[in-house]
Image (spheres, grey):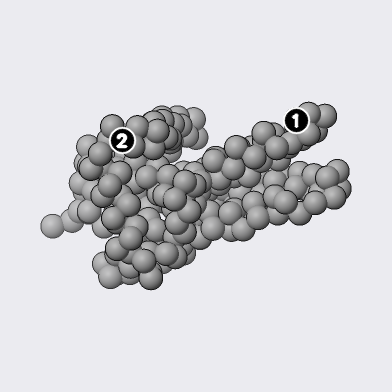
Amino acid sequence: MLNFFNKYKEIRSVMTLTLMSILLLIVRLEVYYTFALVYLIWNLFLAFIPYLLVARLRFKKDITNFNIILSGIIWITFLPNAPYLLTDLIHIKTALKSWIVLESLMILSFSITGVYLGFISMYDMVTILIKKGWLKNKYWVAIFENGIWILCACGVYLGRHLRWNSWDLLHSPNKIFLDLFYLFKDVHKNQNAWIMVVSLSTFLIVIYALFKSFFSLPIVIYKRKV
């Protein structure tokens, strides 16, 4: 777990990125006189959900297995919203040529903030699972992390191209899983989709590894007392 000082630095960095994103959006509103991309705030709010969910668990001394399982289901449901912000970069093409730098920086700031929130929540979730003894060694940690990022990439595809939302799992789970089934069933037919899934999952896996390395966040395997 992070000590108090690191928690303070984490909160400060999250707030700094968030405020910078909103500030750039306000500048854009003043320039364009349009609310076309205000929904980026909503997308960022969705990226905050998995982060806040795991942050809540961090401050609990005794976490029940049921609490972890229930929180984990909600967490993995909303986690794709964090890297989803990367796909909002497609809206740069609609920017006026004279303001394309501002547009790029504004959307990129939201994207970086979302990915940063996703990385922190992943690290904290892994730490919690290790302490519970559910991830017993570095190989299980790698399988869990990489598997989740691949699922996130699939979730981003479902959201960006098929327009599914996280809460659609509550009332249309069959249709979502059917779309996933067809995605895996015919890889050649869904070549464009797989290019996106593979490239995004590779990006997340590599950048997350660099994130842990750069911020000196080692994964410590705790030995459970017998």
225 over 160 or under it: above or below: below
Rendered location of residue 76, percent (x, y): 37, 55
The amino acid type, in three-letter code, at marker 2 is Lys
Residue corresponding to mark 2: 189
The residue shown at (38%, 69%) is 170
The residue shown at (50%, 60%) is 49
Rendered location of residue 190, percent (x, y): 34, 37
Residue corresponding to mark 1: 101
**Towards the viewer: 226 or 157:** 157
The residue shown at (70%, 37%) is 94
**Towards the viewer: 199 or 181:** 181
Between the C-alphas of marks 1 and 2, the distance is 37 Å
Is label 1 in a helix, a strand or a loop?
Answer: helix
Rendered location of residue 124, percent (x, y): 41, 51
Rendered location of residue 102, percent (x, y): 76, 35
**Towards the viewer: 120 or 162:** 162
Q: Badge 2, how many Cα within 10 Å: few under 14, some, many 20+?
A: few
220 over 41 or under it: above or below: above
**Towards the viewer: 102 or 138:** 102
The amino acid type, in three-letter code, at marker 1 is Val
Is label 2 in a helix, a strand or a loop?
Answer: loop
Q: Badge 1, how many Cα within 10 Å: few under 14, some, many 20+?
A: few
Specify whether residue 151 is in view. yes
The residue shown at (64%, 40%) is 91
